Image (spheres, grey):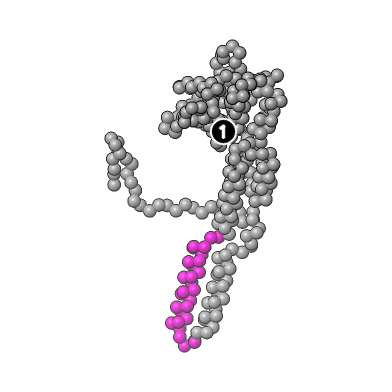
Amino acid sequence: MNGQIHDGSARPLHTGPTRARPRRTCDPRRFPSLGGASRPFHLAVAASVALVALLTGVPRDAPGVTAAILAGGAWLSLVLAMTLPSRNERAGQELVRRLAQFRHELNAIGDSPAADALERLVRRAAELELREEDIHDELEQLRACADAAALKSSLARTGLPVVEPLDPLPPGDACHFVCPVRFGRRRSDQFGHLILSAGWLRFRGALDVSVAWSEVAHVRRDGREIVVSLRESRRMLRFSCQTFLEAARGGAIAEHLASASIGGQPPRPAEHPAAL
């Protein structure tokens, strides 16, 4: 079955059955609380006991009934073995449940959590018996949040870091942050570099964008993205960084520069330039 969308052809629509997603499995020894024997084993034992009881009560001169009971018991055992999850599958389901619980608690603290919230989540991962390979991205996000919190507290004391710009800056301006980003909406993304200087937020790529800090109303981080809201405009600029750490550091510096512009205080560079 084919369809037309505007002037182009759409992909054929498939009416066949959707493939079921394979069940996730895990070593059951990771979660001793699930118990030793699996549910199918317990049900098989119970079915065997019931089958023996039925066979005991059947008269010996009724072989047809005995055969029917045996056939029904075999069919029931086969159905249970095929449909009920194994120990590995039950452990996989438990891992999925714990991962969902941890990610829910991580999302609840936001992108700028307090230090005690970060420490509590690290302890929570240990309580849920989650390994680093299970929550690699989440741990990277936690480390980025901790780094951003430390950076924010140091900006007021030591000033902004100074790094080498990609292009020469106007006299009196200083570059504080540079990183590769993806800028724009999904269908028209531009790849280039985000540059945060004392006076401007700049994007250098196939399309160059420059925004003075006085035009910036708000800066926030959304995962790996730095989101910039402009004054007197509904437009938002989204810069997608390659890592959580780059987004966290860039977001902290951009927020500091925007706040300094609102307060009328020029940002103070660090006494000793340091690379990010």
User: Mark 1 = which residue?
Assistant: 220
Q: Can residue 97 be seen in this view?
A: yes
**Magenta region includes residue 111:** no
Q: Is residue 62 above or below residue 14?
A: below
Give the residue drawn at x 64%, y 39%: 113
Q: Where is residue 224 in the image (x, y as percent from the top left)?
A: 55, 34
**Magenta region includes residue 71:** yes
Q: Where is residue 70 in the image (x, y as percent from the top left)?
A: 48, 76
User: Quarter of the image containing the C terminus?
Assistant: top right
Residue 233 located left or right of residue 174? left
Circle 1: residue type: Arg
Residue 7 located left or right of residue 202? left
Q: Where is residue 130 in the image (x, y as percent from the top left)?
A: 63, 48
Between 116 and 95, the one lying in front of the other is 116
Q: Can residue 274 be seen in this view?
A: no
Quarter of the figure with residue 48: bottom right
Give the residue drawn at x 50%, y 21%: 210
Quarter of the figure with residue 168: top right
Give the residue drawn at x 55%, y 60%: 86
Q: What stretch is highlighted in magenta?
A: 59-86
Q: Is residue 21 above or below residue 174?
A: below
Give the residue drawn at x 55%, y 16%: 167
